[in-house]
């Protein structure tokens, strides 16, 4: 330790000692006056690192995390090279020197990002060799101008698609941490010089890469911290400039679930360079805006079953597996940038409650979408209840192209960030799981800390120190935001500090071999209300949320026959070896909870069971904690016309069904689940649940069809009873004939049974000022009569008024079908928000 740093460290310790007794203190953030001597944090003039991640291999998983990573190694991730068409080597653009060839997009680096870490965690020679084939492919592909990787260009303007390279750079960084191969530094330096030389209008030109420039920004700073090349800071500003604006007030540039989870951290990254704390706040604002509109649900994520869509914020809306693992990585990186334990809390929430349910327990198959309320997981089309049409809910190892590859990084990065280095040469237990960390600390001594725990299924975490000789350094322990009564002891002696939720305990002492620190995080049952989703309730116990235990029937189906349309697999991949699985309920799921009004948490009791012998707690059978509850069936709550559990309704819901004992199990263990519950009451003032019409009649009241409907819009909500506020009501779903312009178009209702009608009302969609849809030039109404389609109403009655209903009355007719024909305005498209008939 040099003199300057010794003095700085002494100064920082003096600050701490003012608040501490017995070398222990409670702090909000680590002090950044000193710089870690052993691990590379941010280089000036970047904002100093609050925490620094340790090189790959420093953290070894234990307990359930080790079991999960073993299953990942032996499951889909470990074998994807034998299945995915994008990972076959023959003709692969990732292995070609000039970037020509096939399969040269995100899939390979998505997979390699996690697979490579897995190879190092298990020190598996075969996996390391396999990884290095691809790493060398990238390293050998650099062209004279500095570009590397597959030479993907856009058809329309010939500019380069750099998106996949952003992900490959994360792989190269992991490889460098392990190998210190100077070719990585050389390649990245030349590549970034090439980017600096490109005019703005040739850099991050199209959708995905424009949204995701924050990933490139991360790697620019990674390299800058290692080389100090000043041009990199110039490039960082340029990349920020050409990236989509994630610093907008009260909105986002884009509502795609993966883009959000991955890109909301971009302002916080750029803050490292500008020191403008407004940019750091913008990242929090993005997070909060998404949670406010679409994240009023348990599990740490939000409803974005492809995109977040206004009107689709019920807990039955899903999130993509890519969205989960990107959110976890963003949380882990934000912990280091901001020092705020809030991000570790969110990371644990997603990791424990949401992500495990996206895969089968053996980690051999996964699904694209998972929702907090999800009662069927099959190969059927559920659009537009979820946005995508196709088999998006089936556990299929041949399918879900992006998630199939990208899921690989979820647990390895989680493992890497359990432990972080601190600026004052210490260590922080940031996210909790059984593990062992090896690191240099204090004045250079080597220490191992073994973390023994069944957390998040247990309250107690035991840290055992191993060191050849005594070494003085600070140990930081994160106190989760949910824990109001944490306690810490060293060698059995309780520390005289009162740990505060959402802060850190810092213990500085001369640590000796065999020292033991015990962190106790008492967990309590608590009830969370989601006021924006009809006051539905979730039940938490510490970091875990609980879901209704639903009996599962698991049905094996053919993977090739049920894959999503854009899937691709190798000729030798055997669907019999890699089957798919649908999950169906065998017990009722449509319960509301009976709650003690004054003390809701008293409505539940805890049941602890044995730790699973196979160390895998994420199934309804093996989870070692259950919560017992009481509820009544709500018979009217059924699947809706999309085959999804119908959206929630006002509570308490009225039910006179008998009160039953219910078992709740950890949400992460349930592939079928209800996690946001209605409450029930048999009192007369309770709300009557409105049954889905389809449930009564067995078939829809009517079918809607049109000459055309834009892919992102829907015909299904034209007659849902909602009242638009204007013709450009952004909260309202709509149908549009986009991108047809100036054409004659139609939309039609076909009734299940002859219907008597005497009026029709249309609310036109018109986005003047924002888009290219206008009220039509004219329209008419026709009804089916025998073999013909006579008109209804008088021509003069057909108005094309904006921001209101356009009503037509006529002598009653009985018919089985009704059709609107429109003539769109020249050059413009058009659409309808609502169409009511009586
Ligand atoms: Zn995905």
Image: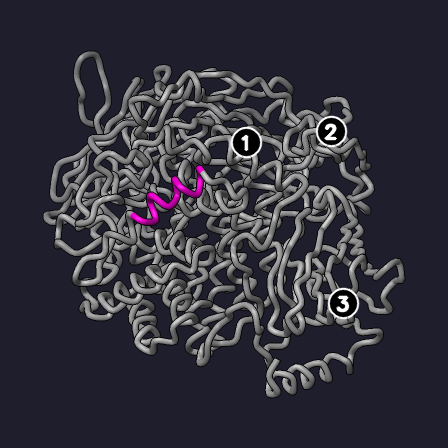
* Classed neighbour count for the residue bearing mark 2: other residues with Cα under 10 Å, few (<14), some (14–19), many (≥20): many
The verdict on residue 128 being magenta is yes
Quarter the C terminus occupies: top left
User: Does residue 776 sit above or below 264 in this rendering?
Assistant: above
Tell me the SS state at disc 2.
strand
Distance in Å between CA atoms under marks 2 and 1: 17 Å
- The label nearer to you, 1 versus 3, is 3
Give the labeled residue for mark 1. 374
Residue lying furthest top in this view? 786
* Rendering coords of residue 364 (x, y %): 49, 28
Residue numbers of the magenta segment:
126-136
Residue lying furthest front in this view? 468
Give the labeled residue for mark 2. 663
Q: Earlier in the sequence, mark 3 or mark 2?
A: 3
Tell me the SS state at disc 1.
loop
Q: Earlier in the sequence, mark 2 or mark 1?
A: 1
User: Does residue 758 sit above or below 429 in this rendering?
Assistant: above
* Classed neighbour count for the residue bearing mark 1: other residues with Cα under 10 Å, few (<14), some (14–19), many (≥20): many
In-front residue for pair 624/433: 433
Give the labeled residue for mark 3. 470
* Rendering coords of residue 395 (x, y %): 47, 27
In-front residue for pair 440/408: 440
* Rendering coords of residue 245 (x, y %): 35, 65
Quarter the N terminus occupies: bottom right
Distance in Å between CA atoms under marks 1 and 3: 53 Å
Horizontal side, residue 452 vs residue 134: left or right: right
Horizontal side, residue 494 vs residue 619: left or right: right
Looking at the rendering, the quadrant in which ligand 1 lies is top left
Please give the label number shown on residue 649. Answer: none
Decide: marks 2, 1 in contact (CB < 8 A)? no
């Amino acid at each position: 330790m040099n003199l300057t740093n010794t003095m700085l460290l002494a100064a920082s310790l003096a600050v701490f000692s003012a608040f501490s007794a017995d070398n222990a203190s409670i702090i909000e953030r680590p002090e950044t006056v000193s710089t870690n001597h052993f691990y590379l944090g941010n280089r000036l003039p970047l904002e100093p690192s609050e925490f620094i991640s340790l090189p790959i291999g420093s953290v070894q998983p234990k307990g359930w995390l080790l079991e999960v990573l073993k299953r990942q190694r032996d499951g889909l991730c470990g074998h994807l090279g034998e299945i995915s068409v994008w990972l076959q080597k023959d003709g692969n653009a990732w292995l070609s020197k000039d970037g020509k060839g096939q399969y040269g997009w995100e899939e390979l680096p998505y997979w390699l990002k996690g697979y490579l870490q897995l190879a190092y965690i298990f020190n598996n020679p075969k996996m390391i060799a396999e990884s290095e084939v691809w790493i060398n492919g990238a390293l050998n592909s650099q062209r004279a101008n500095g570009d590397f990787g597959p030479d993907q260009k856009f058809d329309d303007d010939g500019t380069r698609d750099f998106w996949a390279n952003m992900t490959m750079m994360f792989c190269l960084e992991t490889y460098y941490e392990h190998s210190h191969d100077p070719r990585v530094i050389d390649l990245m330096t030349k590549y970034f010089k090439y980017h600096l030389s490109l005019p703005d209008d040739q850099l991050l030109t199209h959708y995905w890469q424009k949204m995701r420039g924050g990933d490139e920004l991360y790697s620019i700073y990674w390299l800058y911290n290692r080389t100090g090349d000043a041009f990199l800071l110039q490039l960082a500003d340029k990349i920020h400039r050409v990236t989509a604006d994630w610093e907008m007030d009260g909105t986002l540039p884009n509502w795609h679930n993966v883009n959000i989870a991955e890109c909301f951290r971009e302002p916080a990254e750029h803050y490292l360079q500008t020191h403008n704390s407004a940019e750091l706040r913008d990242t929090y604002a993005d997070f909060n805006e998404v949670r406010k509109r679409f994240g009023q649900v348990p599990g740490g994520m939000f409803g974005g079953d492809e995109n977040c869509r206004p009107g689709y914020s019920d807990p039955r809306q899903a999130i993509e597996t890519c969205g989960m693992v990107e959110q976890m990585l963003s949380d882990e990186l934000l912990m280091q940038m901001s020092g705020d334990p809030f991000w570790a809390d969110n990371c644990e929430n997603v990791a424990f409650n949401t992500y495990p349910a996206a895969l089968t327990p053996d980690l051999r198959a996964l699904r694209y979408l998972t929702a907090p309320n999800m009662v069927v997981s099959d190969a059927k089309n559920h659009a537009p209840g979820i946005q995508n049409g196709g088999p998006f809910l089936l556990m299929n190892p041949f399918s879900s192209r992006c998630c199939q590859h990208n899921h690989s990084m979820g647990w390895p990065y989680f493992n890497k960030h359990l432990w972080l280095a601190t600026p004052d040469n210490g260590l922080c237990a940031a996210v909790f799981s059984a593990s062992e960390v090896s690191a240099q600390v204090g004045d250079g001594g080597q220490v191992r800390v073994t973390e023994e725990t069944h957390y998040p299924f247990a309250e107690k975490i035991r840290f055992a120190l191993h060191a050849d000789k005594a070494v003085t350094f600070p140990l930081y322990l994160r106190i989760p935001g949910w824990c109001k009564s944490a306690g810490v002891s060293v060698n059995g002696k309780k520390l005289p500090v009162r740990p505060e939720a959402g802060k850190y305990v810092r213990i500085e002492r001369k640590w000796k071999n065999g020292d033991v620190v015990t962190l106790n995080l008492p967990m309590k049952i608590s009830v969370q209300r989601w006021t924006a989703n009809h006051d539905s309730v979730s039940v938490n116990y510490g970091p875990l949320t609980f879901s209704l235990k639903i009996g599962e029937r698991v049905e094996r189906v053919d993977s090739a026959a049920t894959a999503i349309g854009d899937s691709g697999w190798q000729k030798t991949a055997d669907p019999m070896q890699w089957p798919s699985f649908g999950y169906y309920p065998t017990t009722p799921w449509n319960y509301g909870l009976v709650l003690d009004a004054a003390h809701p948490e008293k409505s539940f009791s805890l049941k602890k069971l044995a730790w699973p012998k196979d160390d895998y707690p994420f199934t309804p059978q093996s989870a070692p904690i259950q919560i017992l509850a009481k509820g009544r069936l709500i018979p009217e709550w059924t699947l809706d016309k999309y085959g999804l559990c119908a959206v929630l309704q006002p509570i308490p819901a009225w039910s006179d069904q008998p009160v039953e004992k219910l078992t709740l199990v950890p949400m992460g263990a349930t592939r079928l689940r209800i996690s946001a519950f209605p409450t029930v009451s048999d009192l007369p003032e309770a709300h009557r649940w409105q049954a889905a019409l389809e449930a009564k009649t067995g078939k829809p009241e009517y079918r809607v069809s049109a000459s055309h409907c834009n892919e992102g819009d829907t015909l299904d909500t034209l007659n849902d009873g909602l009242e638009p506020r204007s013709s450009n009501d952004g909260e309202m779903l709509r149908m549009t004939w986009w991108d047809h312009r100036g054409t004659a178009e139609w939309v039609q209702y076909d009734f299940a049974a002859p219907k008597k009608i005497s009026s029709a009302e249309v609310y036109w969609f018109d986005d003047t000022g924002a888009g290219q849809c206008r009220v039509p030039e004219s329209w008419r109404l026709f009804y089916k009569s025998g073999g013909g389609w006579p008109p209804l109403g008088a021509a003069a009655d057909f108005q094309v008024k904006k921001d209101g209903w356009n009503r037509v009355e006529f002598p009653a007719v009985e018919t089985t079908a009704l059709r609107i024909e429109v003539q769109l305005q020249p050059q413009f498209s058009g659409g309808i928000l609502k169409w009511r008939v009586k």
